[in-house]
Amino acid sequence: MTTMAQALNTALREAMDEDERVLVFGEDVGALGGVFRITDGLSAKFGDDRCFDTPLAEAGIVGFAVGMAMGGFRPVVEMQFDAFAYPAFEQIASHVAKMRNRTRGRVRLPLVIRIPYAGGIGGVEHHCDSSEAYYAHTPGLKVVTPATVEDAYSLLREAIEDPDPVVFMEPKKLYWSKSDIEHLERTEPFGRAAVRRPGRDATVVAYGPSVPVALEAADAAAAEGWDLEVIDLRTIVPFDDATVAASVRKTGRCVVISEAAGFAGVGAEIAARVQERCFHSLEAPVLRVTGFDIPYPPPMLEHHHLPGVDRILDALDRLQRDDEPDTRYLGGAA
């Protein structure tokens, strides 16, 4: 059995083996191996000139990575926790995302910013957040979030090889998810969504930490007569309009699942794209099941905030009504 954490570690190890320009650095990634042990053993194998600890200064970490990438290296930096990355956001939005455009393509930044994100681990304040919309809304960044062990390995390998900056968002609660695969191999490339479960009655679109919840809801819905198709986006940017639209045109209904707050979130963008492309195929409004429009709650209340099976089943119930949908919140979105 291989965990997602082990798959990510293997991806880093192989990338460093194959290309001496790949460097790994961040807070506690060296001897400790990272808070979640994703970088375990890398410093011992490659030396502290290729996997090393930095000061506790996220803006400095990313700024240093920009310079390293401009100098020909391929840095992979860890932000340790999602909300810890906010001090570095000015560097990410102003420099990482814009350098290629600013230089008319003469300077590219082949760097990866790894961000453990989202909830499900009972983290205290500043240790759990769903920040994907900030990065997805910033032109110049690719935004990736795996939901399976296989994709964690494949997408990270591709991110490291990409000539442009990638924000690689790792669902914390899935670090210990397992797969019985014997050999880690490449899966589909960036921009290709995966149909995790085929179905005919409604399309459920999810990404990252919400994919296992969507699959669990599909199993529960089957007992109520629903045959749900579950789409795993894999990459938020680039977005796979073709796979999502083809599914919705087939099923005629769509529910979008996201842990983040609903207002102005990635789920809202997905809903808009589905409505624009599939309007004449829709038999009901596109619904969102999201986190509430509040800061992440304390650990003991987190399960009320995160989208669960019951709230997804409630959305399905609304999809099959003949009357006009009401304005109750299914999460942060009406």
Image: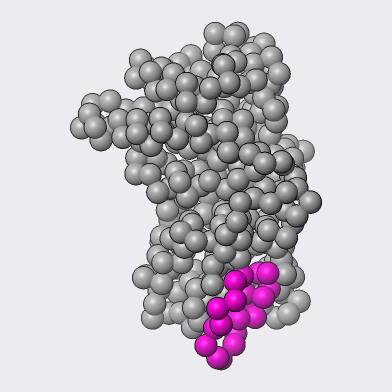
Q: Nearer the viewer, residue 138 or 16?
A: 138
- Residue 51: percent from the left, percent from the top? 58, 15
Magenta-highlighted residues: 311-330
- Residue 161: percent from the left, percent from the top? 44, 29
- Residue 180: percent from the left, percent from the top? 74, 42
In the image, is 75 to the left or to the right of 209? left
Quadrant in which the N terminus appears: top right
Instruction: Relative to 303, say whether 142 is above or below.
Output: above
Q: Nearer the viewer, residue 40 or 136?
A: 136
In the image, is 104 to the left or to the right of 59? left
**Residue 148 appearing in the image:** no
Instruction: Relative to 53, say whether 282 is above or below.
Output: below
**Residue 86 appearing in the image:** yes
Residue for point 67% across, 24% down: 34
Is residue 32 part of the magenta span, yes or no? Answer: no
Q: Can you name the residue that lies furthest to the left here?
A: 104
Task: Please state the total of marks drawn on the protein image.
Answer: 0
Q: How is the image coloured?
A: one colour
Q: Nearer the viewer, residue 26 or 144?
A: 26
Residue for point 67% across, 57% down: 306
Residue for point 43% across, 27% down: 111
In the image, is 299 to the left or to the right of 117? right
Quadrant in which the C terminus appears: bottom right
Residue for point 28% across, 32% down: 100
Q: Nearer the viewer, residue 227 or 187?
A: 227
